[in-house]
Image (tube, rainbow, N blue to C red):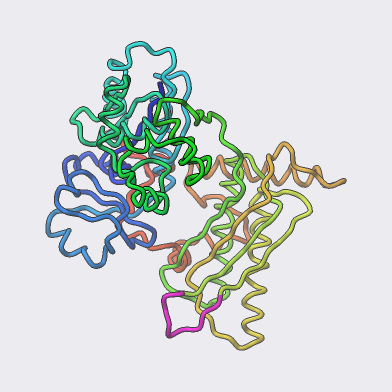
Amino acid sequence: MVAIADCVGFYAAYHQSTEPHLKGAPVVALSNNDGCIIALSPEAKALGAVRCSAWYMVQEEYEAKGFRAFSSNYREYQAMNKRLMKIMARYVPRLETYSIDECWMDLAGINDIEAIVPKLIKDVKQLTGIQIRIGVAPTKTLAKVAINLAKTTPDNFCILDNSDRIQSALRCIAIEDLWNVGAQYAALLHRNGIRTAARLSVTPEYWVRKKMTVLGWRTLQELNGIPCLDLVEVMNPKKNIGVGRSFKKTTSDEQTLVDAATYYSFRLSEKLREEKLVATVLQIKLRTNKWRVDTAQHQPCMVFHLDKGISNGLDITKHAQQAVRSIVAANRKSRAQYKYMKFEINASGLVPEDENQILIGDQFDAGAKNRLSRAIDMINLQLGKGKVCFANNLSAWKQDTKDKYIMRQEYKTPNYFTDWNEAPILH
């Protein structure tokens, strides 16, 4: 048997769990730059809040109803995710993190599943304040069916452990709601009279394989209780890692753009070291506001192919600053006045740091830079982001300059899990 656990309105639930006075209050989490609603608490849904609504359009109406909105804080969400995974790992032999708010669990060898599942839900709620749902079934696809039904049960779980329960559940799932069935396949199945998961489960294999390729065939097999998708305990290495943020206001000022490049390059280097990877290709982009038809558009990009893989902040920042200065110099030469609203830096050609090819005579230099970067990571983790930086990067970390290129977060909560200085104090 396999199970999937899903957090209920994870981003909004995080804010309710770290701000206890919000328990029972309608809470929404906003996208970057406080643009749209991306997560809702059950209380917010009950009052009619709609996901993807532009916050500036509904703010007055929702605040009059007592809504509380919060800016997205992804590092905090990731920290809560790690806490959730550690708690759930106590109950199962194997676990696969599927997304920031979902994970698969292997229940092999667990006899009393109906007793374990509600206890797990209760413990997660008690230790984190996050409400989770769990769907249990013989295969991953059936577990996805189970968790859809768990949304309608007061116990927040559904167990499909026999053929009668499975068939009854499949009759309740519309084909467009079935996992791994996209819009095009759903339209194809509708045209052929297949409108529910139960109907698909009895469709001839040759037809499914011909019309839906091997992915559809796997879905068919899983609907009939034959596992085709294994749990992945060790995820494949990432192929690329990127950091990109929109500014509060558009700008053409060279120093502001260089500071933005410095700030986000440092974050990229942190991500690479967290994943224990090094990059052999760096891509730096600047973006104007594509929605403004009254201004000139410019999307410059520079790519650096490196002789060796890097993950330290010194080298990554040097390349990013060089790219931005080159772009600004070219604009100045052509007398162009572009106002940029976004900086992006992407690392690709990633290899594990212990497999990085070091150039002859460069081993000491690379090792020293990596050790220095890790030491800075440890200090900043304890004292706060940006407390230690390089002297030529200092202006990027000053609060009065950061406000020019850091995205809008007017409703940001403290970094309870990732900054000791902002951790709550009990009196």
Q: Relative to 189, say whether 224 is above or below.
A: above
Going by the image, does 281 lie left or right of 3?
right
Q: Which residues are magenta?
A: 290-298
* Corner quadrant of residue 22: top left
Tell me what residue is drawn at x 62 percent, y 82 percent: 331
Whether residue 297 appears in magenta in the rendering, the answer is: yes
Tell me what residue is drawn at x 75 percent, y 42 percent: 356
In this view, the residue in front, 427 or 84, is 84
Going by the image, does 398 lie left or right of 54?
right
Tell me what residue is drawn at x 71 percent, y 61 percent: 304
In this view, the residue in front, 156 or 225, is 225
Q: Relative to 343, say whether 71 is above or below.
A: above
Tell me what residue is drawn at x 43 percent, y 23 percent: 89
In this view, the residue in front, 221 or 95, is 221
Q: How many marks?
A: 0
Q: Relative to 165, say whether 152 is above or below.
A: below
What quarter of the picture does the N terminus occupy? top left
Where in the figure is residue 175, as x and y percent of width and height? Answer: 33, 44
Where in the figure is residue 30, as x and y percent of width and height? Answer: 32, 56
Whether residue 158 appears in magenta in the rendering, the answer is: no
Dominant SS of magenta comes to: loop
